[in-house]
Image (tube, helix red, strand yellow):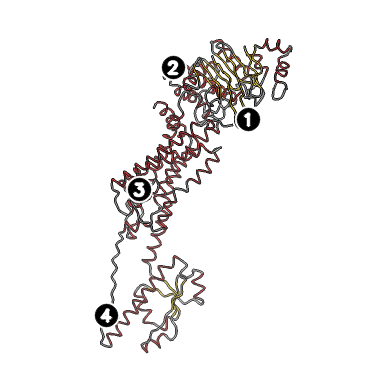
Amino acid sequence: MNTMLIVFLKEVRENLRDRRTLGSALLFGPLIGPFIFALMMNTVITRELNKADQPLRIPVIGAQYAPNLIDALKQEGLIPRPPVANPEAAVRDQDADVVLRIPSDFDKSWRKGEASQVEMIYDSSQRETGGSIDRLRHMLETYSRRQGAMRLVARGLSPTMMAPVSVDDRDQSTPQSRAGQLFSILPYFFVLAVFMGGMYLAIDLTAGERERQSLEPLFANPVPRWKVLLGKLGAICVFSLASLTISVVGFGVCGRIIPAEKLGMTLNLGPAFALQVVLIMLPLVILLASLQTLVAAFAKSYREAQTYLSLLMMVPALPSVLLSVLPIKVAPWMFTVPLLGQQVGITQLLRGGELTSMQISTCVTCGLVVAVLATLVTAAVYRSERLAISA
Amino acid sequence: MIEVRDLYKHFGDVKAVDGVSFVARDGEITGLLGPNGAGKTTTLRMLYTLMNPDRGQVLVDGIDAARDAQAVRRQLGVLPDARGLYKRLTARENIEYFARLQGMEHALIQARREQLIKALEMEDIADRRTEGFSQGQRVKTAIARALVHDPKNVILDEPTNGLDVMATRSLRQFMRRLKGEGRCVLFSSHIMQEVAALCDRIVVIAHGRVVADETPDALRAQTGQLNLEDAFVKIIGSDEGLAA
């Protein structure tokens, strides 16, 4: 116990003196997630709010052929802009989201009681135009329905004849669950924070020590190597845990300042969320520290270790990507798989659900078992002769 | 006392150590002399239990290294070939870290550390971080941390490597002092002048084998050469890898 504590304290002290590494472990790593998240949310919210509140400015060609229609659209919030010479090009070049074209015979067919045609010219591959197109279509359909109903009434018929089936939407998603869908990337940011928090220390304490030739003198001391290893792992865990805590707090702050309720969503990133995240992430802290040390022990140099670990960093993204692309139903077994369990659990919390104590304990226990196994493997590698030899 | 009995260590086809036996006694300086690649470092690494021999036995003060490696390491002060320091710690902190790993009491650490800092004349650098230390300052710090627990046996792998004349002289004096204190001092070198100037006993290693184990005078007598350098060349069979 004493040996582990001595190694642990020395590693923590030495690392605290390394400003550059500290910056990446405790600032860049944990805060990149909240930063990207805030940026993403801000863009989405600003865009949606702008489109919804502002009047729809759309170039209208041939407005003079349908003054009644234009008046009705104006009441719905449309501001007709002067016609453009080449609407197709204007849409492709993103000068206009959509262009409305009214043909000269609009009035003629209207008076005959036939269907009068209008054209919407747009490019659906431009994602940002979706809102404008939908709003214009909705305005036109509303006008069309109202005029149709009036024609029926004028002929003494009930307007309901035109609508034999009426559809009412009963969407079961809650604001939280819609938010959860959007934030499926969030669990990965927590894993990333843990990973970044410990990565440089893990490389430094094994590959770095060997490269600087201080591992051989260290092992000449009368202490078992596994105790040295546990001291080092402890130091790595402390820094990745600090990184995770900073990240969780960062997201908490984000949750307070992002006006997500304007989109009809609720962000629940408060202390209860933070505590549960830290709890189910704990096994990952130990597991990743062991894996990083293991990789660093195999690498021939500091640089090689850095390369391998950058690749290893991609692995935790897999469950995030898979679960957001594939429509997989969450099953109880998922909580037994480290990384996947955390992903599923945190997503569930974000969707406004609760984690049962069974789910939490499954997640933590299985994670710890795998972490202990990884540590045993790392300890075995630490015993090998070639570990300490630098030249 | 360090006893080595019939030590073997092969790496694939390379017979790094191929049957080495010798004894290094207390109160004596024993020199392990040999050209580069003769197997000196590998032999020493097996002595301080960093490597396990394929065959053979290592006894330090009567303790078998294969039975109780940790007890053997406790009896040894080691300056390995790799002498990396922790560059973000000061020289004092470097020494203290190893002292604590040796399980020493706080008061004893203080006393022993200051004693060594004085003996190695490193008062002026003791509170500086070791980043940017000269080769000589690094070796001094590495020796101080290796000897902080007052070991009976001292192993130094090429201790004067990379040192200038003044640093080499003071290191030799320090080694004589260790001998005077009754310790068993074992060091390796490929520089014959150094070995000749210091050693009570010389163990010559070539191609992983001991080719001579004598006092300097006996070596001269055995080979019939007045000059030690000529004596070595005659023993090893070539002058390859030996520096004057």
Subunit bearing disc 4: A
Label 2 packing within 10 angstroms: few (<14), some (14-19), many (20+): few
Vertical side of A177 occupied by A312: above or below: above
Query: Label 4 vs label 2: CA separation?
Result: 100 Å
Which residue corresponds to the image point at 46% horizontal and 16% vertical from the top-left?
A: B111
Residue at mark 3 to residue at mark 2: CA–CA distance: 52 Å
Q: Residue A183, position in %: x, y?
A: 38, 54
**SS of the residue at dot 3?**
helix
Q: Quadrant of residue B194?
A: top right
Q: Same chain for labels 1 and 2? Say yes or no.
A: yes
**Circles 3 and 2 on the same chain:** no
Mark 4 vs mark 1: in front: 1
Which mark identifies residue B14?
1
Q: The residue marked by circle 3 belongs to what chain?
A: A
Instruction: Judge depth for marks 3 and 2 and give the one in front.
Output: 3
Q: Nearer the viewer, mark 4 or mark 3?
A: 3
Numbered disc 4: secondary structure:
helix
Measured along the vertical axis of the image, is residue A349 above or below residue A53? above
Residues at circles 3 and 2 in contact by the CB criterion of under 8 Å: no
Q: Which mark is residue B108?
A: 2
Residue A352 is left or right of residue A59, and the answer is left
Distance of mark 4 from mark 3, alpha carbons?
53 Å
Q: Are marks 3 and 1 in contact (CB under 8 Å)?
A: no
- Tell me the CA gap for discs 1 and 2: 45 Å
Chain label for disc 1? B
**Residue on which disc 3 sits:** A335
Q: Nearer the viewer, residue B30 or A218?
A: B30
